[in-house]
């Protein structure tokens, strides 16, 4: 039988993040005038991460971080083959948190980075020049880790697909095959979703720097 595991907000977050990361990486490689789009995609990544953090606290059971946080006991049980669950397995959860942490670092460093040539983040004028240059160096130097983690993530999806556990399909329709009765994810709570979206919009507005008086 099939049960719904991933609610619609979680699935939309996943695929919008894929698009935003792809656009950010491609525009960074193109350089030049595309750096304007790099900043826009980066701001989109920031907003999506803020939403996921909020939804990890306010969302439904399978979307909440507490339901799949990779504790030592869960990891041990998984390695011994005694772990059971419908959401992220403990190793998959490690990948999720690693990606969220690295992408969060990239997004925050991009907001304040400045290389004095090709790109300045929307909040670069709010920090000392030395910190903006340092953030720019970190932002570029950690890009390789994004490719590595994304590669491992895609490899894991392919391995599970080969073993008859289609994770890709689950992140499209939100359902998974189970052999026993299991509690499906409830529809997104309207109030929680509205709060998460409003707080996300506020965070994106603050990060965009539109509130900063122009330098004359």
Image (spheres, rainbow, N blue to C red):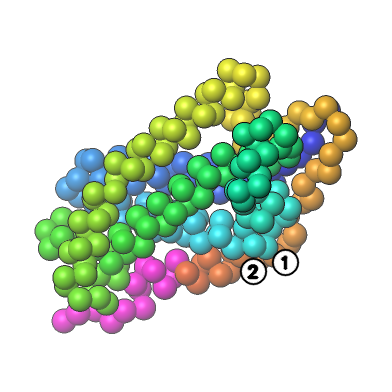
Q: Residue furthest left?
A: 117
Decide if residue 22 is on the left or right side of residue 66.
left
Q: Is residue 105 above or below residue 12?
A: below
Residue 109 point in image, percent of width and height = 31, 61
The residue tagged with tag 2: helix, strand or loop?
helix
Mark 1 vs mark 2, CA separation in Å: 6 Å
- Examine the rendering and report whether any part of residue 2 can be seen: yes
Of the pair 42 and 90, the residue shown nearer to us = 90
Instruction: Say whether marks 1 and 2 touch (CB < 8 Å).
Output: yes
Residue 146 point in image, percent of width and height = 36, 43
Q: Does the magenta stretch include residue 173?
A: no
Of the pair 13 and 165, the residue shown nearer to us = 165
Q: Is residue 145 above or below residue 216?
A: above
Q: Residue at x 51, y 61 (%)?
A: 50
- Which of the 4 image quadrants contains residue 211? bottom left
Which stretch appears magenta? 204-216
Q: Is residue 211 magenta?
A: yes
Residue 82 point in image, percent of width and height = 72, 34
Of the pair 129 and 78, the residue shown nearer to us = 78
Q: Label 1 neighbourhood size at 10 Å, few (<14), some (14-19), many (20+)?
A: few
Q: State the mark number for residue 15.
A: none
Q: Label 2 neighbourhood size at 10 Å, few (<14), some (14-19), many (20+)?
A: some
Q: What residue does disc 2 label?
A: 195
Residue 43 point in image, percent of width and height = 39, 58
> Which SS type dominates the magenta stretch?
loop
- Examine the rendering and report whether any part of residue 86 can be seen: no
Q: Which residue is drawn at 68% across and 31% down?
A: 81
Q: What residue does disc 1 label?
A: 191
Q: In which quarter of the image is the C terminus?
A: bottom left
- Which of the 4 image quadrants contains residue 161? top right
The residue tagged with tag 1: helix, strand or loop?
helix
Q: Residue at x 60, y 48 (%)?
A: 72
């Amino acid at each position: 039988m099939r049960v719904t595991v991933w609610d619609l907000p979680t699935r939309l977050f996943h695929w919008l993040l894929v698009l935003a990361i792809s656009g950010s990486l491609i525009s960074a490689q193109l350089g030049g005038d595309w750096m304007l789009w790099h900043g826009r995609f980066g701001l989109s990544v920031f907003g999506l991460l803020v939403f996921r953090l909020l939804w990890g606290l306010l969302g439904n059971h399978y979307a909440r971080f507490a339901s799949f946080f990779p504790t030592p006991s869960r990891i041990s049980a998984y390695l011994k083959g005694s772990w059971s669950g419908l959401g992220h397995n403990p190793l998959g959860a490690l990948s999720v948190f690693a990606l969220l942490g690295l992408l969060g670092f990239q997004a925050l460093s991009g907001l304040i980075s400045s290389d004095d040539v090709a790109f300045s983040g929307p909040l670069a004028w709010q920090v000392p020049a030395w910190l903006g240059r340092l953030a720019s160096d970190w932002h570029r130097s950690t890009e390789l880790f994004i490719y590595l983690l994304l590669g491992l993530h895609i490899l894991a999806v392919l391995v599970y697909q080969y073993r008859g556990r289609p994770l890709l399909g689950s992140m499209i329709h939100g359902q998974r095959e189970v052999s026993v009765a299991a509690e499906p994810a409830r529809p997104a709570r309207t109030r929680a979703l509205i709060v998460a979206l409003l707080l996300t919009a506020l965070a994106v507005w603050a990060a965009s720097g539109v509130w900063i008086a122009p330098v004359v």
